[in-house]
């Protein structure tokens, strides 16, 4: 995948691995075994494949936690998280009898002194190299990363949690690792919230730990100065609407409506055989289609069908020997492209079937409630009347709950009596938990009639951008991105935890629609980055906004990050679970197994 995923964050990760692990390996001609924990397995899989590793002299890849046969003539590369669990396994590999000739140890992040001292005490004589790589984040896409820890939601927002502080510290370390990998020292701002203060606390932690990181890195040299980059930290409750809506862009729609596990789409082909396809950036067609509206994707399906038909006809026809030889040379790539087209043809059909069966009826109601206006731009005067068709029709429980939530969000809260009446139509014993628990995120749910008119933040006018009546809502984070890049962000609502480099403002980030002034300015702007981290999960539609704004403001790259990527169903399950104490113990910097 290294060549195919030559994009953004994956490229940064792979380059760092090449510059450290691979470069050290090339100094010896002895074949090596690479040993990975669960997190580093995912990390490496996101940016390379086995053939890339074999070309660098790595012949065996092993799971740290599984039983492994000793290979005393080989050198072992340990690419692991810096925690006691991983170190205990490493020590066991070299005591009492070593499994390998020597160990090259690479940590994803800064190794705490007690853990390092324990390793040093038991197997120092076998260790030839020990480095910290600042790679404790997972590059999900070229402009999106996660901490790869969905459990973070419960540990931060669950009122019964005992691990909130430790969780925020772990998240801060991962954000610092991202900044270090990008060689950025950004100014930090956070969204002020009177009900929850996680964004403020996280901003303080990242600020202090970034300073410590660059202090350690500088040694006796001059400390690294601020770079023209900004980091914005925001709570999930900042925009509760976006992750609840039915989205109609291809990627968001697929992950909402189709059962996709570990980015894998399972389907039956035309011959009835079960197939699997990975939906990631190694699939060029997926990258091309994922942010398009399903209507646009559907328009391209006839073209894909014609291409598949034409290719099949070509291969069925008699060919000359030279023509056959050329076809054989192109065959692997040709087959791959055909497989991608067939996959997306089937996936689009599945999405459209769900849309026509049920979702289309929901979308108009959801869009009216979310935007507060109808398709003609007229204000919705009676949200209850808008909601009732969903409650009175035989939609599934989750869809009704999503509609009720959008109704409550549209009013900035409702009375308990009104909510009880609405939930009678949902017909689910635990429906109230899906609604009330949003209060833990700082979202107003129950309020008196006198507070119904609470003023909501003004939104950008996007009436000229709207192409589809059932997709009028724009994620709030896109407004924030554009406000930052145009230096319009409200300083009271978004306090500065640390100053941004002067170069950010002098770079005067401008839209691609505006005329740019000079090549020297363009070079300066090209170094600008906006990193946005959402505490509690980010949606696929919010990830899409990073690409859209980067395309519009070509002078600045926008990167989205969070603890994990969420889907509407997953988010509602998380919200409901806030009623109970977290059941899993927090594992710092190590993904739950």
Image (cartoon, rainbow, N blue to C red):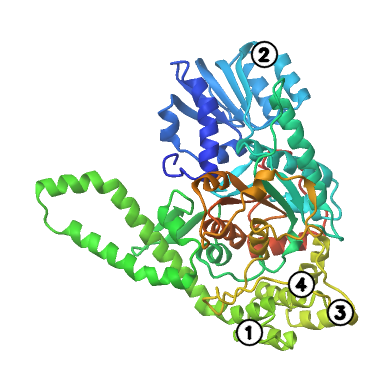
Residue 138, horizontal then vertical, whole percent: 60, 43
Task: Give residue 35's quadrant in the image.
Answer: top right
> Is there a contact, CB below 8 Å, between mark 3 and mark 1?
no
Disc with the residue nearer the chain's start (2 vs 1)? 2
Q: Nearer the viewer, residue 408 or 350?
A: 408
The quadrant of the picture occupied by the C terminus is top right
Q: CA distance from mark 1 to mark 4?
A: 32 Å
Q: Nearer the viewer, residue 459 or 247?
A: 459
> Is there a contact, CB below 8 Å, between mark 4 and mark 3?
no
Label 1 environment density (alpha carbons within 10 Å; few <14, some 14–19, many ≥20): few
For residue 415, which numbered disc appears in the image?
3
Report helix, strand or loop for mark 3: loop
Disc with the residue nearer the chain's start (1 vs 4)? 1
Name the residue rendered at 47%, 38% in the picture: 48
Disc with the residue nearer the chain's start (3 vs 2)? 2
Task: Give residue 245's quadrant in the image.
Answer: bottom right
Name the residue rendered at 38%, 56% in the picture: 340
Residue 202, horizontal then vertical, whole percent: 78, 46
Disc with the residue nearer the chain's start (3 vs 1)? 1
Disc with the residue nearer the chain's start (4 vs 2)? 2
Report helix, strand or loop for mark 2: helix
For residue 124, which numbered disc appears in the image?
2
Q: CA distance from mark 2 to mark 1?
A: 70 Å
According to the picture, the residue beneath numbered tag 4 turns out to be 431
Q: CA distance from mark 3 to mark 1?
A: 28 Å
Report helix, strand or loop for mark 1: loop
According to the picture, the residue beneath numbered tag 1 turns out to be 377
């Amino acid at each position: 995948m290294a060549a195919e995923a030559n994009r953004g964050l994956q490229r940064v990760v792979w380059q760092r691995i090449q510059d450290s692990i691979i470069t050290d390996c090339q100094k010896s001609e002895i074949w090596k075994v690479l040993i990975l924990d669960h997190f580093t397995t995912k990390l490496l899989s996101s940016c390379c494949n086995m053939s890339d590793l074999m070309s660098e002299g790595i012949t065996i890849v092993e799971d740290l936690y599984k039983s492994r046969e000793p290979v005393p003539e080989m050198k072992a590369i340990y690419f692991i998280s810096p925690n006691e669990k991983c170190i205990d396994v490493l020590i066991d590999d070299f005591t009492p009898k070593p499994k390998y000739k020597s160990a090259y140890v690479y940590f994803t992040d800064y190794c705490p002194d007690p853990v390092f001292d324990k390793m040093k005490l038991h197997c120092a004589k076998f260790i030839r190299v020990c480095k910290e790589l600042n790679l404790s984040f997972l590059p999900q896409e070229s402009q999106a990363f996660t901490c790869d820890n969905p459990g973070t939601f419960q540990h931060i927002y669950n009122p019964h949690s005992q691990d909130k502080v430790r969780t925020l510290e772990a998240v801060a370390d991962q954000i610092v690792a991202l900044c270090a990998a990008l060689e950025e020292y950004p100014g930090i701002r956070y969204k002020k919230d009177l009900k929850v203060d996680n964004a403020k606390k996280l901003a303080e932690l990242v600020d202090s730990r970034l300073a410590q990181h660059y202090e350690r890195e500088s040694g006796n040299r001059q400390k690294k100065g601020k770079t023209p980059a900004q980091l914005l930290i925001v709570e999930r409750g900042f925009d509760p609407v976006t992750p609840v809506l039915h989205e109609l862009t291809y990627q968001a729609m697929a992950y909402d409506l189709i059962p996709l596990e570990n980015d894998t789409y399972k389907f039956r082909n035309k011959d009835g055989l079960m197939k699997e396809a990975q939906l990631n950036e190694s699939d060029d067609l997926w990258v091309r289609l994922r942010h398009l509206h399903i209507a646009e994707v559907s328009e391209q399906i006839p073209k894909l069908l014609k291409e598949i038909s034409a290719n099949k006809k070509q291969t069925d026809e008699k060919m000359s020997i030279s023509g056959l030889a050329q076809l054989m040379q192109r065959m692997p790539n040709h087959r791959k492209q055909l497989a991608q087209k067939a996959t997306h043809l089937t996936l689009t059909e599945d999405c459209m079937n769900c849309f026509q069966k049920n979702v289309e009826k929901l979308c108009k109601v959801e869009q009216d409630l979310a935007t507060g206006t109808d398709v003609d731009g007229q204000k919705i005067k009676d949200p209850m009347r808008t909601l009732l068709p969903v409650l009175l029709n035989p939609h599934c429980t989750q869809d009704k709950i999503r509609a009720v939530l959008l109704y409550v969000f549209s009013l900035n809260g409702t009375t308990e009596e009104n909510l009880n009446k609405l939930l009678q139509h949902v017909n689910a014993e635990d429906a109230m938990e899906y609604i009330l628990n949003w209060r833990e995120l700082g979202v107003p749910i129950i309020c008196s009639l006198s507070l119904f008119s609470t003023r909501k933040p003004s939104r950008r006018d996007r009436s000229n951008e709207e192409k589809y009546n059932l997709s009028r809502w724009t994620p709030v984070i896109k407004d924030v991105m554009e406000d930052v890049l145009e230096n319009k962000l409200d300083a009271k609502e978004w306090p500065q935890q640390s100053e941004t480099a002067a170069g950010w403002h002098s770079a005067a980030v401008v839209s691609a629609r505006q005329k740019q002034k000079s090549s020297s300015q363009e070079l300066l702007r090209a170094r600008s980055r906006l990193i946005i981290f959402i505490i509690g999960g980010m949606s696929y539609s919010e990830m899409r906004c990073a690409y859209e704004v980067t395309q519009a403001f070509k002078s600045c790259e926008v990167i989205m990050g969070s603890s994990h990527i969420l889907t509407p169903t997953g988010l509602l399950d998380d919200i409901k679970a806030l009623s109970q104490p977290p059941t899993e113990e927090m594992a710092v910097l190590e993904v739950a197994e």
